[in-house]
Image (cartoon, rainbow, N blue to C red):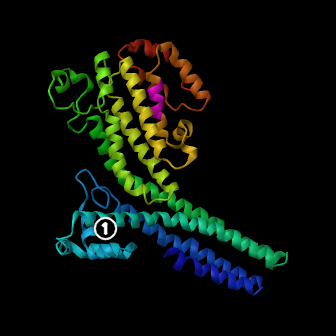
Amino acid sequence: LLEEKCLPPPRRSTLRAFATGHTGTASAAANVCVDVLGRVLLEVLARRAELGASLLRPGEGLLAGQSGLGHAALSFAKSTAGKGFRGVQGAAARAGAGGKVLGEINDETEEQMRMRTSIGVARAAANFNDLEVVAEYTKRLEGNFLKEIDAGYPRGHDTEQLRMCIKGLGGVVESFSNASERAIERLVSTMLPRVRQIVNEAVGNEGGSAIPAASFMGSPVLSGATSTVSSTRLDYDLDDRAFELAQLSEGYVGRMCSSLDELIEPLGAHFLPKLSDALLIGILGGVSTRLEAAIRKSKFTPLGAISLDSDVRYLMNFAKDRLDSPELKSNVTLCKACLPLARLNQISLLLNVDDLEDVLDLISVSKRKGNWDLKLDDAKTLLSLRVDFEGSKVNDLLQMDDE
């Protein structure tokens, strides 16, 4: 619909003006084309993307929240207004449908409702994709117009002015790209509350059934009962037996990543690869920030530090398996793209030093490579979490200016 109705008219009008051979007419048409794409269409598509973000709010929109699908998703799936969803008009139709529509199709199966909700997610995702589609279209359009000028106009001052008018499309491309980035940032911000819930549930901050790895001594497995062991929560204060048992249980990171998959997968199937990657990087940032806060509340044995390293690697491999861009498939580029995840990786490296004397070498080498963001105060706080490191020795070792 976008390519058929919105994009061809400005191109055709400009080409008709080019066909006159008059640079003034062609320049005027080029300016109108730049204005239509860069102002009118940009405003419309940006508003549609904003609507898409609100429709995809977990628990309140078309994505499942902690208690499943929200009222908006159910209303969308069961209403005839939802079936005919088209951008702002569809949203207005659904908003005006009210509770009466919910009862009109009570005989609809759960599978049918799920299918219609999936269609709603796809259409909301298309609102984001449209910004990238128009950016790419405009970039190609600029190149085609410049070729037309080279082929049909003689060199001169007026032709150069026409060329400058066409190059205004470059700014339009940048505007659409910036709008696309802002739209994804807005979507990430609407999804972060649910992401934080997922992390809290996984690490054991919200009273779930997860139990510490160190509490397995009375578990049904060890007592010979037939029931299975509950999933572990975040706990790195591990002795030898607790460490071994933690390896046999479902770790909190695996459970967390499964929940993240359930949240992100419906969008990843419909987003352009670039947008899917940007969304995942944003979600990873929120996850990493929440995990760092939880890690700072734990104590670490040397075995617990090894367990943390394994968990961070698991999270990074989870991300790399789902990212489309080859450039993000390495740990270095992934950490550069997601700074909170980079901090998490640095925390893991810091807590896994065998001896305090190795800390300064680790920080110095990492800084030279540009892979270190932790301040010395952060390093002191984190190293103090190791139960085998004395706090006074940590402070004495790191008494230096933070370069």
Image quarter in which the C terminus is found: top right
Q: Which sits in the foreground, 307 or 370?
A: 307
What is the x, y in percent for residue 214?
Answer: 25, 22
**Going by the image, does 232 lie left or right of 176?**
left
What is the x, y in percent for residue 152?
Answer: 80, 79
**Category of crowding for the residue at label 1, using alpha-carbon neighbours closer than 10 angstroms: few (below 14), some (14–19), many (at least 20):** many
Question: From what the image shows, is residue 185 above or below residue 374?
Answer: below
**Going by the image, does 67 lie left or right of 160?**
left
Can the viewer see residue 341 in this picture? yes
- Disc 1 residue type? Arg
Q: Which sits in the foreground, 275 or 38?
A: 275
Q: Secondary structure at mark 1?
A: helix
Q: Is residue 306 magenta?
A: no
Residue beneath the point at 75% across and 87% down: 20
Q: Which sits in the foreground, 175 or 91?
A: 91
Magenta residues, start to end: 343-349
Question: From what the image shows, is residue 149 above or below residue 327?
Answer: below
What secondary structure prevails in the magenta region?
Answer: helix
* Residue, far bottom: 20
Residue beneath the point at 60% across and 69% down: 137
